[in-house]
Image: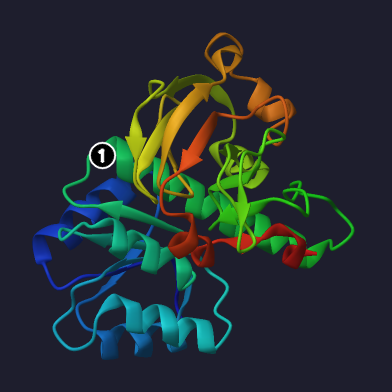
Amino acid sequence: MNNDFDILIIDDESVIIDSIMKICKLNNLTADSAETYDIAIQKIKQNKYRLVICDIMLPDKDGFEILKSLGSIGYESPVIMITGYTTPEMAVKSIKLGAFDFLPKPFTIDELSAIIKRGITYSNLNRKKVQDQNNLLYVSCPSKYYRFGYNSWIKQDLQVNIISEGFSYGSFVTGVTDLFVKLTEGVRKIELLQINDKISQAAFSAYITDNDGLTHSFIMPLSCRIIDRNEKLIENPELIEKDPYFEGWFYKVIPTNIKDEMENLIQCSSDR
């Protein structure tokens, strides 16, 4: 018998399942659970879920195998990966394999509530998109941009210093996608890092507080050093709602490992 749930939690730790269940209940969401890869895949085939929250470390197969399996069948509901063994490589691999987002353990109620909100809203947008293909629900990033998952974008700055083997070693501009902004459902405040801060790919690099008071994390698309930041955003956070790809940029950066990391990005022209 098929059942409809808002969320499937895949984790072998009962304390984590219970914690997420409680947070789901606080947000008026129903949740189901699975403790292994086999049980999770079986439940996904038998039930409908709007969002999947999956631990990377499972007793039979890891969460990456779940991402691969769901990708092979064209599964459309978003998947959030969680893990207590957090490394930049795990976050990057999750996003590259199609995860909607990544959240390290331990997480706070606010952090999980924010990411669940984005995931459920994304699922709702997908349903609307299927029902009305002529309705523009969000603006894709421009064709010469690259995006990191659904979260952030990066493009070459106009001031280019050196080009070698097809890569620019000058400055780049980065910011948040229009889809990410739409999923927060209103921006109240933006917190940026400092100039000269060094950031790894997939690291949390800015914080967006929505109208509900939840804080959403912006992830850096490439490892880099920040050389400038958009001070206008701090005074006028609504800029990213009006113009996320131009006036609403976050940082100008110098990438530090562009040759190895560009392959983890998606060229926005492929979205069309």
Q: Position of residue 86 (x, y in %)?
A: 20, 57
**Looking at the image, which residue is at 58% across and 40% down?**
170
139 horizontally vs 155: left or right: right
Looking at the picture, how far across and down is residue 174, in whole percent?
Answer: 57, 38
The residue positioned 52% from the left and 67% from the top of the image is 263
Depth check: 180 or 36 in front?
180
Q: Residues within 10 Å of mark 1 (few under 14, many from 20)?
A: some
Q: Quadrant of the C terminus?
A: bottom right
The answer to which image quadrant residue 237 occupies is top right
Tell me: residue 216, above or below residue 191: below
Residue annotated with mark 1:
109
Q: Position of residue 26 (x, y in %)?
A: 31, 42
**Callout 1: helix, strand or loop?**
helix
Q: How many callouts does the rendering have? A: 1
Q: Quadrant of residue 197?
A: top left
Query: Is residue 52 in sight in this rendering?
Result: no
**Is 96 situated left or right of 170 in this image?**
left
Which is more toward the observer, 22 or 158?
158
